[in-house]
Image (spheres, rainbow, N blue to C red):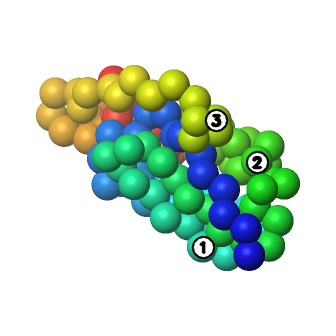
Amino acid sequence: MQTTELKVDGMTCGSCVASVTKALRRVPGVQDVEVDLGSGIARIRGEHAAHQVPELIAALGEAGYGAGPATAAPATHRQHPAGGCGAGSATKGRGGCCGG
C-alpha cells in the first residue's frame, strides 16, 4: 500500500475535515484517509495512491477545496464568518464550508 500526502487549502473546521475525508474516500482505490486540520495535510493510503494525485486533487476541487503536493507553500486559512461555520456562505454544505 502506498501513501500520498496533499496540502489542502481552505479547511477551517471539523466539517471541512469531514468533507475532505469523504471526497477522498470516493476515489476508487483509496483505502484510508487521515486529515490533519492543524497542518492542512491529507494522508491518503491505497494501492495506487502515488499515481492518483490528479484524481485526488480533482475530487477535492469538486468538493470546494484547492490542493497540491504536501511540499507546496503553506495554505492561507480563512476565518469563520460572523455567526459560525457556514453562516451566509454561498458554498455551505459543499465543502469550503466557511467560504469567508
Badge 1 marks a residue whose secondary structure is strand
Contact? badges 2 and 3 (CB < 8 Å)? no
In depth, the one of 22 and 54 nearer the eye is 54
What residue is disc 1 on?
Answer: 32
Badge 2 marks a residue whose secondary structure is helix
Quadrant holding the N terminus: bottom right
For badge 1, the amino acid type reads Asp
Residue 53, label in figure: 2
Q: Residue at x 66, y 63 (%)?
A: 3
Residue 68 visible in the snapshot: yes
What residue is disc 3 on?
Answer: 68
The 10 Å Cα crowd at callout 2, few under 14, some 14 to 19, many 20 or more, is some
CA distance for labels 3 and 1: 18 Å
Instruction: Please give left or right for residue 57 compared with residue 98 in the image.
Output: right
Quadrant hosting residue 66 = top right
CA distance for labels 1 and 2: 15 Å
Tell me which numbered mark, 3 or 1, is placed earlier along the sequence. Answer: 1
